[in-house]
Image (cartoon, rainbow, N blue to C red):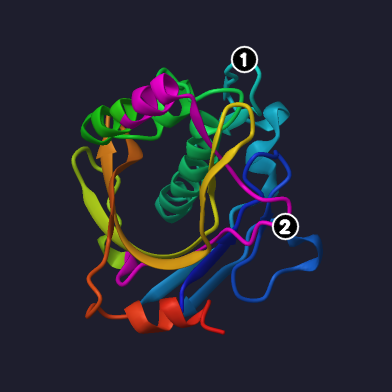
Amino acid sequence: MTGHRLRSRLGRIAVVVVAGVCAAGCGGIAFGDDGDETTVAVPPAVVDVSVVGQTLTPPARQTVVIPEAWPSEIEALYGRYWLYWDAFAAAFGPPHADPEHGPLRTLSTDRNWASLSQQLEGFRSDGLVLVLPDRSITEHLIRLPNAAVVDGTEGAEVVLQDCWIDDFVQQTEDGAVVAEAREAKLMNVTMKVENGTWRVDGVTRAATDSDGHDQCEALLTP
């Protein structure tokens, strides 16, 4: 399975982003083209509050910075999806789940937020959070089958494939582990332009007979 690999140290501002061959230090923006697939490296500068317009800082959590503008539609699509997972980790993470988490709301469509906010309320009422282990291998290998369909007009939709290496740990607010797993999951991601920006409209697990499923799961096969 080829595409765009994003390894995010969720829960921190420092993020390493790799796509194809990365320049020294992963600085700047790298572009690549594999047939109909496009790979884009998100520049580390997107998390620097000195170079972006909008900063959303929920109390007692890491800052998730959402740029007001991106150099291209492709970078906006990938970049906002990447930030969605940073915001997801912050919203569901310690000290408690936050059903009013501003960054996650901003990166989600109304439809997706209705579902997420319900989940967050459930976690909050049950005293549960999601955390990543110290040596987390969380990773997103993203495939955009046809970059030509990326259109930033209102209501436009794009479907991505995301091979997600998931090792979130569910625990109580005081640190007792409830459930933990390390799993490779092929996800279908619907991105939609809503209120002028790309937002995550839904993330659903692909069927076991879908294209790329076996290759994705093989990434964690002993």
Q: Which mark is residue 208?
A: none
- Measured as percent of width and height from the top left, residue 134 is found at 73, 51
Q: Secondary structure at mark 1?
A: loop
Q: What is the tally of numbered marks visible in this picture? A: 2
Q: Going by the image, does 182 lie left or right of 115? A: right
Identify which residue, 192 or 189, lies in the foreground. Answer: 189
Compare marks 1 and 2 and give the one earlier in the sequence: 1
Task: Name the spot of residue 197 as percent of width and height, x first.
Answer: 35, 36
Label 2 near label 1: C-beta < 8 Å?
no
Q: Is residue 220 above or below residue 108?
A: below
Is 47 a magenta residue?
Answer: no
**Residue depicted at 34% across the width and 39% down the height:** 199
Residue 81 visible within the image:
yes
Residue 59 has which mark?
1
Task: Please tell me which residue is depicted at 42% across the width and 25% down the height of the picture.
Answer: 126
Give above or below for 124 relative to 171: above
Residue nearest the viewer, comparing 207 with 212: 207
Q: Which stretch did the figure color magenta?
A: 119-147
Tell me the crowding category of disc 2: few under 14, some 14 to 19, or many 20 or more residues within 10 angstroms, Cα based: few
Amino acid at the residue labelled 1: Pro
Disc 2 residue type (three-letter): Arg
Please report the residue visible at 66 percent of the width from the left and 56 percent of the height from the top.
136
* Disc on res. 135: 2
Q: Residues within 10 Å of mark 1 (few under 14, many from 20)?
A: few
Q: Is residue 126 above or below residue 21?
A: above
- Residue 205 occupies quadrant: bottom left
Residue occupying the point 58% across, 27% down? 173
